[in-house]
Amino acid sequence: MSSESNAVVTIDGPAGAGKSTTARQLATRLGYSFLDTGALYRTVALSARQLGIDWADGPAVGDLAAKLRIRFQPEGGVNRVLVDGKDVTDDIRAPEISQGASKVSALPEVRAALLGLQQVIGARERTVAEGRDTGTVVFPNAFAKFFLTATPEERARRRLLELEAQGRPAPFAEVLAELQQRDARDSGRAVAPLKRAADAVEIDTDGKNIVEVVALMERLVRERGG
């Protein structure tokens, strides 16, 4: 095995499938670091919005992505996201920024700018990485790969609960429609589309709690020597 394959566990899947929560808990159980690749794209989208850069402007957003200094800082069970020293953890979770992240992630210039950063982070230490293309593009030689799924309705329900907890309630139909639009955009983009890696273990999270899913993943990782 290469050093990369020994160091990384990937978790991919659509929005609301439970990637972030399971990845964070799995990393804790294994003693690995946690790489939230989606947070990187959200940060780029937020920064572009603040600077008045159109999310469809590939060259401009790509140039911005290459210049941003993004780092993660674990704090009290939360993976804080800092860009150029400023904490943007809560700001990048706004619904409009989620849509923006999906749009900028389709830009080849942005994906190229962030690919190296993700691989550098994964090379530093044993890492659990979650996103849309971590097992197919970012870490194709990862020694353990997972792909989480759930029905659109279940994923929309989970997203609605998150929004309510943040004090941002929204109609279920609206949340479901936005999620389906994002699914179509993520799966249909020309560069690094959302799809299951051929060697990834697919886990349907419908009807399963986080504890069950994390326990299953931990067992499989340890069986492979992780």
Image (cartoon, rainbow, N blue to C red):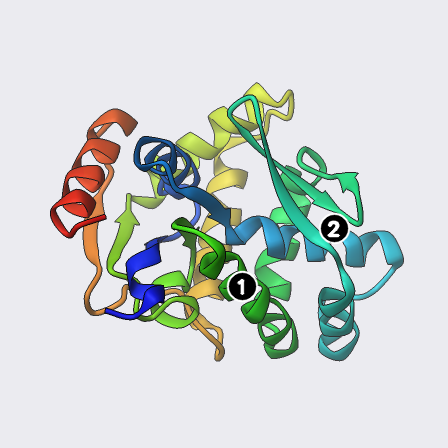
The secondary element bearing badge 2 is classed as: helix
Amino acid type at image mark 2 = Leu
The location of residue 199, given as percent across then percent down, is 19, 66
Residue 7 in which image quadrant: bottom left
Residue 136 in which image quadrant: bottom left
| Marks 2 and 1 close (CB-CB < 8 Å) | no
**Front: mark 2 or 1:** 1
Residue situated in front as seen by the camera: 48 or 178:
48
The location of residue 213, given as percent across then percent down, is 23, 34
For the question of whether residue 162 can be seen, the reply is yes
Total residue callouts:
2
Q: Is residue 24 above or below residue 108?
A: above
Q: Residue at x 71, y 76 (%)?
A: 58
In the picture of the structure, the residue carrying the numbered disc 1 is 120
Q: Residue at x 41, y 64 (%)?
A: 133
The location of residue 11, given as percent across then percent down, is 34, 51
Q: Is residue 40 above or below residue 189?
A: above
Amino acid type at image mark 1 = Val
Extreme right residue here? 51
The secondary element bearing badge 1 is classed as: helix
Q: Which label was assigned to residue 141?
A: none
In the picture of the structure, the residue carrying the numbered disc 2 is 46
Q: Earlier in the sequence, mark 2 or mark 1?
A: 2
102 with respect to 208 (left or right): right
Q: Residue at x 64, y 26 (%)?
A: 168
Q: Residue at x 39, y 65 (%)?
A: 194
Label 2 neighbour load within 10 Å: few <14, some 14-19, many 20+? many
